[in-house]
Amino acid sequence: MAFTSKKATIHKTYKHKMSGFSKNKPINTQAENEQKEMQETKERFFVFIGKLEEKLKEFAAASIPELIEMNHTDTDEFKRGYLRLKSAVLGQLDSIREKASAVKEEKITYFPYASDTLEMSSAYIQFRNECYDRYSLLEDMCQEYRQRIEDTQVEDYELKYRKIVDEYEAIKDKFRCVQCGSPITIDKIYFTTTYITCPSCQTKNTFEPSSQAKLLEHIGRSLAEQRTKHILQQSDAAGKEERDLYHKAHQLRLSLIHEKNKEILHQKEKEMEELEQQRQEAASRQPILYQKYLRAMFDEWNKINPDLTNEHERFFTTLATHNNR
Amino acid sequence: MSNPLLEPIHGVSLQDYAAISAKLVSGVAQADILNALGIEPAVYEEASALWVTRMQEDQTWEVTTLYGQYFGNADQHPKLSGLNVAISEEGQANLDKLNTDRYFYEELCGARQAAYQYGLDGAQWIQENFGINLGDFQAVAMKWMEVQNADWDSVPHFASYQQQKQAAYAAKFAAEQGGNVADDVVF
Protein backbone atom coordinates (compact mmCIF):
# COMPACT_ATOMS: atom_id res chain seq x y z
CA MET A 1 0.00 0.00 0.00
CA ALA A 2 2.75 2.40 1.07
CA PHE A 3 4.84 1.38 -1.89
CA THR A 4 2.01 1.96 -4.37
CA SER A 5 1.62 5.45 -3.03
CA LYS A 6 5.38 6.08 -3.13
CA LYS A 7 5.56 4.77 -6.68
CA ALA A 8 2.73 7.07 -7.73
CA THR A 9 4.60 10.03 -6.24
CA ILE A 10 7.81 9.05 -7.96
CA HIS A 11 6.05 8.67 -11.27
CA LYS A 12 4.42 12.04 -10.86
CA THR A 13 7.68 13.70 -9.86
CA TYR A 14 9.66 12.27 -12.74
CA LYS A 15 6.92 12.09 -15.35
CA HIS A 16 8.32 14.99 -17.32
CA LYS A 17 11.91 13.87 -17.01
CA MET A 18 11.21 10.29 -18.01
CA SER A 19 8.57 10.85 -20.68
CA GLY A 20 10.98 11.07 -23.63
CA PHE A 21 12.93 8.11 -22.33
CA SER A 22 9.75 6.05 -22.17
CA LYS A 23 8.66 6.87 -25.73
CA ASN A 24 11.93 6.22 -27.50
CA LYS A 25 12.89 2.79 -26.18
CA PRO A 26 11.20 -0.57 -26.09
CA ILE A 27 9.82 -1.39 -22.65
CA ASN A 28 12.09 -4.37 -21.97
CA THR A 29 15.22 -2.39 -22.95
CA GLN A 30 14.09 0.49 -20.80
CA ALA A 31 13.55 -1.82 -17.83
CA GLU A 32 16.91 -3.45 -18.36
CA ASN A 33 18.62 -0.08 -18.47
CA GLU A 34 16.84 1.09 -15.36
CA GLN A 35 17.76 -2.07 -13.46
CA LYS A 36 21.35 -1.64 -14.56
CA GLU A 37 21.31 1.95 -13.39
CA MET A 38 19.78 0.80 -10.11
CA GLN A 39 22.57 -1.71 -9.62
CA GLU A 40 25.20 0.94 -10.33
CA THR A 41 23.54 3.39 -7.95
CA LYS A 42 23.49 0.73 -5.25
CA GLU A 43 27.16 -0.02 -5.72
CA ARG A 44 28.06 3.67 -5.61
CA PHE A 45 25.88 4.14 -2.54
CA PHE A 46 27.59 1.26 -0.74
CA VAL A 47 31.03 2.70 -1.56
CA PHE A 48 29.89 6.15 -0.46
CA ILE A 49 28.58 4.85 2.89
CA GLY A 50 31.76 2.82 3.36
CA LYS A 51 33.88 5.95 2.90
CA LEU A 52 31.77 7.86 5.40
CA GLU A 53 32.21 5.00 7.88
CA GLU A 54 35.95 5.19 7.43
CA LYS A 55 35.86 8.95 8.05
CA LEU A 56 33.75 8.40 11.13
CA LYS A 57 36.15 5.79 12.52
CA GLU A 58 39.20 7.98 11.87
CA PHE A 59 37.54 11.03 13.38
CA ALA A 60 36.34 9.15 16.46
CA ALA A 61 39.74 7.48 16.93
CA ALA A 62 41.35 10.91 17.09
CA SER A 63 38.62 12.70 19.07
CA ILE A 64 37.73 10.24 21.83
CA PRO A 65 41.20 10.14 23.48
CA GLU A 66 41.31 13.94 23.25
CA LEU A 67 37.91 14.19 24.97
CA ILE A 68 38.98 11.78 27.72
CA GLU A 69 42.14 13.79 28.30
CA MET A 70 40.27 17.10 28.34
CA ASN A 71 37.64 15.78 30.75
CA HIS A 72 40.45 14.89 33.17
CA THR A 73 42.36 18.14 32.80
CA ASP A 74 39.52 20.70 32.56
CA THR A 75 39.57 22.26 36.01
CA ASP A 76 36.52 24.46 35.38
CA GLU A 77 33.73 23.50 37.82
CA PHE A 78 31.28 23.11 34.94
CA LYS A 79 33.86 21.70 32.50
CA ARG A 80 32.82 24.19 29.85
CA GLY A 81 35.88 23.67 27.65
CA TYR A 82 35.33 19.92 27.59
CA LEU A 83 31.61 20.32 26.91
CA ARG A 84 32.26 22.67 23.98
CA LEU A 85 34.67 20.16 22.47
CA LYS A 86 32.21 17.31 22.99
CA SER A 87 29.47 19.36 21.36
CA ALA A 88 31.72 20.02 18.35
CA VAL A 89 32.63 16.33 18.02
CA LEU A 90 28.96 15.34 18.14
CA GLY A 91 28.24 18.10 15.59
CA GLN A 92 30.72 16.52 13.16
CA LEU A 93 29.25 13.09 13.77
CA ASP A 94 25.83 14.53 12.90
CA SER A 95 27.21 16.15 9.77
CA ILE A 96 28.36 12.73 8.54
CA ARG A 97 24.99 11.15 9.25
CA GLU A 98 23.10 14.04 7.66
CA LYS A 99 25.24 13.83 4.54
CA ALA A 100 24.43 10.13 4.18
CA SER A 101 20.75 10.74 4.86
CA ALA A 102 20.49 13.47 2.23
CA VAL A 103 22.08 11.24 -0.42
CA LYS A 104 19.84 8.34 0.61
CA GLU A 105 16.76 10.49 0.06
CA GLU A 106 17.91 11.91 -3.24
CA LYS A 107 19.47 8.85 -4.86
CA ILE A 108 17.60 5.94 -3.30
CA THR A 109 14.17 6.99 -2.06
CA TYR A 110 13.52 9.08 -5.16
CA PHE A 111 15.37 6.89 -7.61
CA PRO A 112 13.67 7.64 -10.93
CA TYR A 113 12.24 4.81 -12.98
CA ALA A 114 9.47 4.71 -15.51
CA SER A 115 8.91 1.02 -16.20
CA ASP A 116 5.57 0.08 -14.70
CA THR A 117 6.00 -3.67 -14.33
CA LEU A 118 5.78 -6.01 -11.38
CA GLU A 119 9.35 -7.08 -12.00
CA MET A 120 10.56 -3.49 -11.88
CA SER A 121 8.56 -2.81 -8.71
CA SER A 122 10.11 -5.85 -7.05
CA ALA A 123 13.55 -4.81 -8.20
CA TYR A 124 13.03 -1.34 -6.79
CA ILE A 125 11.84 -2.68 -3.42
CA GLN A 126 14.87 -4.93 -3.20
CA PHE A 127 17.21 -2.09 -4.26
CA ARG A 128 15.68 0.29 -1.75
CA ASN A 129 15.72 -2.24 1.11
CA GLU A 130 19.33 -3.19 0.50
CA CYS A 131 20.40 0.45 0.41
CA TYR A 132 18.33 1.28 3.50
CA ASP A 133 19.89 -1.67 5.32
CA ARG A 134 23.36 -0.44 4.36
CA TYR A 135 22.46 3.05 5.59
CA SER A 136 21.16 1.54 8.86
CA LEU A 137 24.59 0.07 9.50
CA LEU A 138 26.06 3.58 9.31
CA GLU A 139 23.34 4.86 11.63
CA ASP A 140 24.13 2.07 14.09
CA MET A 141 27.80 2.97 13.91
CA CYS A 142 26.96 6.66 14.52
CA GLN A 143 24.85 5.66 17.50
CA GLU A 144 27.62 3.49 18.89
CA TYR A 145 30.19 6.29 18.54
CA ARG A 146 27.74 8.83 19.97
CA GLN A 147 27.48 6.62 23.07
CA ARG A 148 31.26 6.29 23.29
CA ILE A 149 31.60 10.07 22.99
CA GLU A 150 28.95 10.59 25.68
CA ASP A 151 30.74 8.04 27.86
CA THR A 152 33.84 10.25 27.92
CA GLN A 153 31.85 12.55 30.21
CA VAL A 154 32.62 10.48 33.26
CA GLU A 155 32.01 12.20 36.55
CA ASP A 156 33.10 10.43 39.70
CA TYR A 157 30.12 11.36 41.87
CA GLU A 158 31.31 8.96 44.59
CA LEU A 159 34.45 11.05 44.89
CA LYS A 160 32.53 14.34 44.96
CA TYR A 161 30.21 12.98 47.64
CA ARG A 162 33.17 11.64 49.62
CA LYS A 163 34.69 15.13 49.62
CA ILE A 164 31.46 16.60 51.02
CA VAL A 165 31.33 13.94 53.75
CA ASP A 166 35.03 14.40 54.61
CA GLU A 167 34.59 18.15 54.76
CA TYR A 168 31.59 17.73 57.07
CA GLU A 169 33.57 15.43 59.38
CA ALA A 170 36.36 18.02 59.50
CA ILE A 171 34.18 21.03 60.36
CA LYS A 172 31.26 19.63 62.35
CA ASP A 173 32.86 20.32 65.75
CA LYS A 174 34.63 23.54 64.86
CA PHE A 175 31.68 25.91 64.59
CA ARG A 176 31.32 28.39 67.48
CA CYS A 177 28.56 30.74 68.56
CA VAL A 178 29.16 34.32 67.36
CA GLN A 179 27.70 35.64 70.65
CA CYS A 180 29.15 33.50 73.45
CA GLY A 181 31.83 31.41 71.66
CA SER A 182 30.38 28.08 72.81
CA PRO A 183 30.93 25.17 70.44
CA ILE A 184 27.93 24.28 68.27
CA THR A 185 27.93 20.84 66.73
CA ILE A 186 26.79 20.78 63.12
CA ASP A 187 24.48 17.81 63.42
CA LYS A 188 24.21 16.92 59.74
CA ILE A 189 25.30 17.97 56.26
CA TYR A 190 23.51 21.21 55.45
CA PHE A 191 23.27 22.12 51.78
CA THR A 192 21.64 25.53 52.22
CA THR A 193 22.55 28.44 54.49
CA THR A 194 20.85 27.66 57.79
CA TYR A 195 20.11 29.29 61.15
CA ILE A 196 21.40 27.23 64.06
CA THR A 197 20.49 28.16 67.62
CA CYS A 198 23.32 28.13 70.18
CA PRO A 199 22.43 25.61 72.93
CA SER A 200 24.17 27.82 75.52
CA CYS A 201 22.89 31.36 74.89
CA GLN A 202 20.08 30.69 72.37
CA THR A 203 21.57 33.12 69.85
CA LYS A 204 20.59 32.43 66.27
CA ASN A 205 23.78 31.74 64.27
CA THR A 206 24.01 31.62 60.48
CA PHE A 207 25.81 28.58 59.12
CA GLU A 208 26.78 28.79 55.47
CA PRO A 209 27.83 25.51 53.85
CA SER A 210 30.76 25.43 51.44
CA SER A 211 30.08 25.71 47.72
CA GLN A 212 30.62 21.94 47.27
CA ALA A 213 28.22 21.11 50.13
CA LYS A 214 25.59 23.32 48.46
CA LEU A 215 25.70 20.92 45.53
CA LEU A 216 24.68 17.95 47.72
CA GLU A 217 21.13 17.70 46.39
CA HIS A 218 22.28 17.94 42.77
CA ILE A 219 25.18 15.52 43.22
CA GLY A 220 22.90 13.26 45.25
CA ARG A 221 20.60 12.57 42.34
CA SER A 222 23.48 12.00 39.90
CA LEU A 223 25.20 9.69 42.37
CA ALA A 224 21.98 7.78 42.99
CA GLU A 225 21.52 7.40 39.23
CA GLN A 226 25.11 6.21 38.89
CA ARG A 227 24.68 3.65 41.66
CA THR A 228 21.51 2.21 40.11
CA LYS A 229 22.47 2.53 36.45
CA HIS A 230 22.66 -1.26 36.05
CA ILE A 231 18.92 -1.59 36.69
CA LEU A 232 18.13 1.15 34.18
CA GLN A 233 20.30 -0.68 31.65
CA GLN A 234 18.24 -3.84 32.19
CA SER A 235 15.09 -1.83 31.54
CA ASP A 236 16.59 -0.24 28.40
CA ALA A 237 17.74 -3.66 27.20
CA ALA A 238 14.17 -4.98 27.49
CA GLY A 239 12.96 -1.99 25.45
CA LYS A 240 15.59 -2.64 22.79
CA GLU A 241 14.74 -6.33 22.73
CA GLU A 242 11.10 -5.44 22.12
CA ARG A 243 11.99 -3.15 19.22
CA ASP A 244 14.42 -5.66 17.69
CA LEU A 245 11.79 -8.39 17.80
CA TYR A 246 9.30 -6.07 16.16
CA HIS A 247 11.74 -5.27 13.33
CA LYS A 248 12.55 -8.94 12.89
CA ALA A 249 8.87 -9.78 12.55
CA HIS A 250 8.42 -6.82 10.21
CA GLN A 251 11.19 -8.06 7.93
CA LEU A 252 9.55 -11.47 7.85
CA ARG A 253 6.22 -9.82 7.00
CA LEU A 254 7.85 -7.93 4.12
CA SER A 255 9.45 -11.08 2.79
CA LEU A 256 5.98 -12.62 2.42
CA ILE A 257 4.69 -9.98 0.00
CA HIS A 258 5.52 -11.98 -3.11
CA GLU A 259 5.79 -15.39 -1.49
CA LYS A 260 3.59 -18.02 -3.18
CA ASN A 261 4.87 -21.21 -1.55
CA LYS A 262 2.27 -22.21 1.05
CA GLU A 263 4.70 -24.25 3.09
CA ILE A 264 7.10 -21.31 3.41
CA LEU A 265 4.17 -19.00 4.13
CA HIS A 266 2.97 -21.26 6.93
CA GLN A 267 6.45 -21.63 8.40
CA LYS A 268 7.12 -17.87 8.39
CA GLU A 269 3.71 -17.02 9.85
CA LYS A 270 4.40 -19.42 12.71
CA GLU A 271 7.78 -17.80 13.22
CA MET A 272 6.09 -14.36 13.29
CA GLU A 273 3.64 -15.55 15.95
CA GLU A 274 6.51 -16.72 18.13
CA LEU A 275 8.32 -13.42 17.67
CA GLU A 276 5.17 -11.53 18.62
CA GLN A 277 4.86 -13.54 21.83
CA GLN A 278 8.48 -12.81 22.70
CA ARG A 279 7.96 -9.15 21.85
CA GLN A 280 4.96 -8.88 24.16
CA GLU A 281 6.90 -10.53 26.97
CA ALA A 282 9.76 -8.03 26.57
CA ALA A 283 7.25 -5.17 26.33
CA SER A 284 5.63 -6.14 29.62
CA ARG A 285 9.00 -6.65 31.34
CA GLN A 286 10.36 -3.20 30.47
CA PRO A 287 8.04 -1.00 32.62
CA ILE A 288 8.40 -3.36 35.60
CA LEU A 289 12.17 -3.01 35.42
CA TYR A 290 11.86 0.76 35.04
CA GLN A 291 9.72 0.96 38.18
CA LYS A 292 12.30 -1.16 39.99
CA TYR A 293 15.00 1.26 38.84
CA LEU A 294 13.03 4.32 39.98
CA ARG A 295 12.47 2.85 43.44
CA ALA A 296 16.13 1.89 43.85
CA MET A 297 17.32 5.28 42.59
CA PHE A 298 15.08 7.25 44.94
CA ASP A 299 16.08 5.03 47.89
CA GLU A 300 19.71 5.91 47.20
CA TRP A 301 18.90 9.60 46.80
CA ASN A 302 17.08 9.60 50.13
CA LYS A 303 20.09 8.03 51.82
CA ILE A 304 22.40 10.70 50.41
CA ASN A 305 20.18 13.68 51.24
CA PRO A 306 17.60 12.54 53.83
CA ASP A 307 16.48 16.14 54.51
CA LEU A 308 14.46 16.14 51.31
CA THR A 309 13.05 12.61 51.58
CA ASN A 310 9.44 13.81 51.59
CA GLU A 311 10.03 15.96 48.51
CA HIS A 312 11.87 13.14 46.75
CA GLU A 313 9.01 10.78 47.46
CA ARG A 314 6.49 13.17 45.94
CA PHE A 315 8.73 13.43 42.87
CA PHE A 316 8.92 9.63 42.77
CA THR A 317 5.12 9.45 42.78
CA THR A 318 4.98 11.88 39.85
CA LEU A 319 7.47 9.87 37.79
CA ALA A 320 6.01 6.48 38.73
CA THR A 321 2.50 7.66 37.86
CA HIS A 322 3.64 9.13 34.57
CA ASN A 323 5.48 5.91 33.69
CA ASN A 324 2.38 3.82 34.38
CA ARG A 325 0.17 5.82 32.02
CA MET B 1 -4.73 30.26 45.39
CA SER B 2 -6.27 26.84 44.73
CA ASN B 3 -3.09 24.90 43.95
CA PRO B 4 -1.14 24.36 47.21
CA LEU B 5 2.05 23.98 45.20
CA LEU B 6 1.80 27.69 44.37
CA GLU B 7 1.87 28.83 47.99
CA PRO B 8 4.93 30.95 48.84
CA ILE B 9 7.81 29.17 50.58
CA HIS B 10 9.12 31.08 53.61
CA GLY B 11 7.59 34.21 52.09
CA VAL B 12 9.29 33.69 48.71
CA SER B 13 6.59 33.54 46.05
CA LEU B 14 6.94 31.77 42.73
CA GLN B 15 7.10 35.19 41.06
CA ASP B 16 9.96 36.19 43.39
CA TYR B 17 11.79 32.94 42.77
CA ALA B 18 11.42 33.16 38.96
CA ALA B 19 12.45 36.82 38.88
CA ILE B 20 15.49 36.11 41.10
CA SER B 21 16.52 33.28 38.73
CA ALA B 22 16.12 35.54 35.69
CA LYS B 23 18.18 38.32 37.25
CA LEU B 24 20.90 35.88 38.35
CA VAL B 25 21.17 34.46 34.81
CA SER B 26 21.42 38.05 33.50
CA GLY B 27 24.46 38.56 35.69
CA VAL B 28 22.99 40.64 38.55
CA ALA B 29 24.72 39.82 41.87
CA GLN B 30 22.71 37.64 44.24
CA ALA B 31 23.35 39.99 47.16
CA ASP B 32 21.86 42.94 45.22
CA ILE B 33 18.77 40.97 44.31
CA LEU B 34 18.16 39.68 47.83
CA ASN B 35 18.73 43.17 49.26
CA ALA B 36 16.11 44.60 46.92
CA LEU B 37 13.65 41.94 48.06
CA GLY B 38 14.62 42.09 51.74
CA ILE B 39 15.27 38.35 51.88
CA GLU B 40 18.05 36.68 53.89
CA PRO B 41 20.34 34.29 51.95
CA ALA B 42 19.39 31.41 54.27
CA VAL B 43 15.72 31.92 53.51
CA TYR B 44 16.30 32.24 49.78
CA GLU B 45 18.53 29.17 49.52
CA GLU B 46 16.07 26.90 51.27
CA ALA B 47 13.13 28.34 49.35
CA SER B 48 15.09 27.88 46.12
CA ALA B 49 15.78 24.20 46.89
CA LEU B 50 12.11 23.65 47.74
CA TRP B 51 10.76 25.44 44.64
CA VAL B 52 12.79 22.97 42.56
CA THR B 53 11.11 20.08 44.35
CA ARG B 54 7.68 21.71 43.88
CA MET B 55 8.28 21.71 40.14
CA GLN B 56 9.41 18.10 40.26
CA GLU B 57 6.22 16.94 41.95
CA ASP B 58 3.87 19.15 39.93
CA GLN B 59 1.87 16.83 37.68
CA THR B 60 -0.21 19.59 36.10
CA TRP B 61 2.74 21.67 34.86
CA GLU B 62 1.05 24.69 36.39
CA VAL B 63 4.07 25.59 38.53
CA THR B 64 6.49 25.22 35.64
CA THR B 65 4.26 27.15 33.25
CA LEU B 66 3.82 30.03 35.66
CA TYR B 67 7.53 29.97 36.45
CA GLY B 68 8.25 30.44 32.76
CA GLN B 69 5.84 33.35 32.51
CA TYR B 70 7.29 35.07 35.58
CA PHE B 71 10.83 34.40 34.37
CA GLY B 72 10.01 36.01 31.03
CA ASN B 73 8.43 39.00 32.76
CA ALA B 74 11.04 39.49 35.47
CA ASP B 75 11.22 43.16 34.58
CA GLN B 76 7.64 43.53 35.72
CA HIS B 77 8.46 42.34 39.23
CA PRO B 78 7.54 45.24 41.55
CA LYS B 79 10.83 45.20 43.43
CA LEU B 80 13.27 43.98 40.79
CA SER B 81 12.21 45.82 37.65
CA GLY B 82 15.03 48.37 37.82
CA LEU B 83 17.75 45.87 38.64
CA ASN B 84 19.65 45.25 35.41
CA VAL B 85 23.20 44.78 34.20
CA ALA B 86 24.59 47.37 31.79
CA ILE B 87 23.78 46.77 28.13
CA SER B 88 25.25 48.53 25.08
CA GLU B 89 23.11 50.69 22.80
CA GLU B 90 23.47 48.14 20.01
CA GLY B 91 22.67 45.31 22.40
CA GLN B 92 19.52 47.11 23.54
CA ALA B 93 18.44 47.64 19.93
CA ASN B 94 18.97 43.94 19.21
CA LEU B 95 17.14 42.98 22.38
CA ASP B 96 14.18 45.16 21.36
CA LYS B 97 14.17 43.52 17.95
CA LEU B 98 14.37 40.07 19.57
CA ASN B 99 11.26 40.96 21.56
CA THR B 100 9.21 42.04 18.57
CA ASP B 101 10.56 40.19 15.54
CA ARG B 102 9.89 36.45 15.67
CA TYR B 103 12.08 35.80 12.62
CA PHE B 104 15.03 37.51 14.27
CA TYR B 105 14.46 35.44 17.40
CA GLU B 106 14.34 32.19 15.38
CA GLU B 107 17.47 33.22 13.50
CA LEU B 108 19.45 33.75 16.70
CA CYS B 109 18.17 30.45 18.12
CA GLY B 110 19.47 28.71 14.99
CA ALA B 111 22.75 30.61 15.20
CA ARG B 112 23.24 29.69 18.84
CA GLN B 113 22.56 26.01 18.13
CA ALA B 114 24.95 26.01 15.17
CA ALA B 115 27.62 27.69 17.29
CA TYR B 116 27.41 24.87 19.86
CA GLN B 117 27.70 22.31 17.04
CA TYR B 118 31.00 23.90 16.07
CA GLY B 119 32.49 23.96 19.54
CA LEU B 120 31.65 27.57 20.37
CA ASP B 121 29.85 28.75 23.48
CA GLY B 122 26.59 29.67 21.76
CA ALA B 123 25.38 31.97 24.53
CA GLN B 124 28.71 33.76 24.63
CA TRP B 125 28.70 34.06 20.83
CA ILE B 126 25.30 35.81 20.96
CA GLN B 127 26.62 38.11 23.69
CA GLU B 128 29.71 39.01 21.66
CA ASN B 129 27.98 39.43 18.30
CA PHE B 130 24.60 40.86 19.31
CA GLY B 131 25.21 42.22 22.81
CA ILE B 132 22.39 40.16 24.35
CA ASN B 133 23.17 38.23 27.52
CA LEU B 134 21.86 34.73 28.23
CA GLY B 135 19.35 35.87 30.87
CA ASP B 136 17.73 38.44 28.57
CA PHE B 137 17.71 35.94 25.72
CA GLN B 138 16.00 33.29 27.85
CA ALA B 139 13.44 35.80 29.09
CA VAL B 140 12.50 36.59 25.49
CA ALA B 141 12.45 32.86 24.72
CA MET B 142 9.83 32.36 27.43
CA LYS B 143 7.66 35.04 25.84
CA TRP B 144 7.88 33.50 22.37
CA MET B 145 7.09 30.11 23.87
CA GLU B 146 3.82 31.53 25.17
CA VAL B 147 3.05 32.93 21.73
CA GLN B 148 3.81 29.54 20.22
CA ASN B 149 1.62 27.72 22.73
CA ALA B 150 -1.28 29.89 21.64
CA ASP B 151 -0.66 29.29 17.92
CA TRP B 152 0.47 25.74 17.18
CA ASP B 153 -0.31 26.11 13.48
CA SER B 154 2.68 28.39 13.03
CA VAL B 155 5.13 25.92 14.59
CA PRO B 156 6.18 24.11 11.36
CA HIS B 157 6.75 27.43 9.59
CA PHE B 158 9.01 28.87 12.26
CA ALA B 159 10.74 25.53 12.94
CA SER B 160 11.59 25.30 9.26
CA TYR B 161 12.84 28.90 9.25
CA GLN B 162 15.04 28.21 12.28
CA GLN B 163 16.47 25.08 10.61
CA GLN B 164 17.32 27.07 7.47
CA LYS B 165 19.08 29.70 9.55
CA GLN B 166 20.87 27.06 11.61
CA ALA B 167 22.12 25.44 8.40
CA ALA B 168 23.30 28.82 7.09
CA TYR B 169 25.19 29.62 10.29
CA ALA B 170 26.55 26.05 10.39
CA ALA B 171 27.95 26.57 6.89
CA LYS B 172 29.51 29.86 8.04
CA PHE B 173 31.13 28.26 11.10
CA ALA B 174 32.28 25.27 9.04
CA ALA B 175 33.92 27.60 6.53
CA GLU B 176 35.66 29.48 9.33
CA GLN B 177 36.97 26.20 10.71
CA GLY B 178 38.15 24.75 7.40
CA GLY B 179 35.08 22.65 6.60
CA ASN B 180 33.48 19.48 7.89
CA VAL B 181 35.31 16.23 8.45
CA ALA B 182 33.63 14.41 5.53
CA ASP B 183 33.54 17.21 2.97
CA ASP B 184 35.84 15.29 0.65
CA VAL B 185 33.54 12.27 0.51
CA VAL B 186 31.22 12.59 -2.48
CA PHE B 187 28.60 10.26 -3.93
Image (cartoon, rainbow, N blue to C red):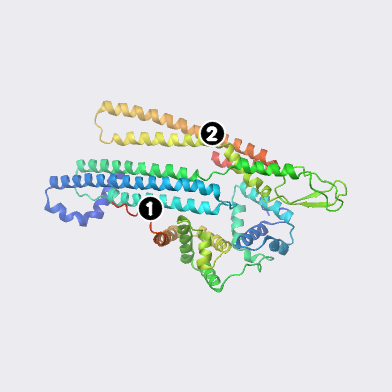
Image position of B44 (left or right of A290): right
Of residues A18 and B29, the one nearer the viewer is B29
* Above or below for A41 versus B101: above
Q: CA distance from mark 1 to mark 2?
A: 40 Å
Mark identifier at residue A72: none
Location of mark 2 (residue):
A289
Image position of A18 (left or right of B136): left
Image position of B31 (left or right of B183): right
Instruction: Tell which subunit mark 2 falls on.
Output: A
Which residue is at 22% across, 55% downward?
A: A15
Mark 2 surroundings: few (<14), some (14-19) or many (≥20) residues within 10 A: some
Name the residue type under label 2: Leu
Callout 2 secondary element:
helix
Location of mark 1 (residue):
B181
Evaluate whether residue A317 shows in this view.
no
Evaluate whether residue A6 shows in this view.
yes
* Above or below for B80 versus A133: below
Of residues B148 and B135, the one nearer the viewer is B135
Callout 1 secondary element:
loop
* Above or below for A225 versus B32: above
For the residues beneath circles 1 and 2, the answer to whether they share a chain is no
Of residues A275 and B132, the one nearer the viewer is B132
Where is residue A229 drawn, in percent x and y? 55, 37
Where is residue B88 drawn, in percent x and y? 57, 72
Which residue is at 15% across, 52% downward?
A: A22
Where is residue B73 drawn, in percent x and y? 61, 63
Which residue is at 54% across, 66% downward?
A: B132
Mark 1 surroundings: few (<14), some (14-19) or many (≥20) residues within 10 A: some
Name the residue type under label 1: Val
Quadrant containing the C terminus of chain A in the rendered view: top right
Image position of A38 (left or right of A165): left
Which residue is at 49% across, 32% downward?
A: A284
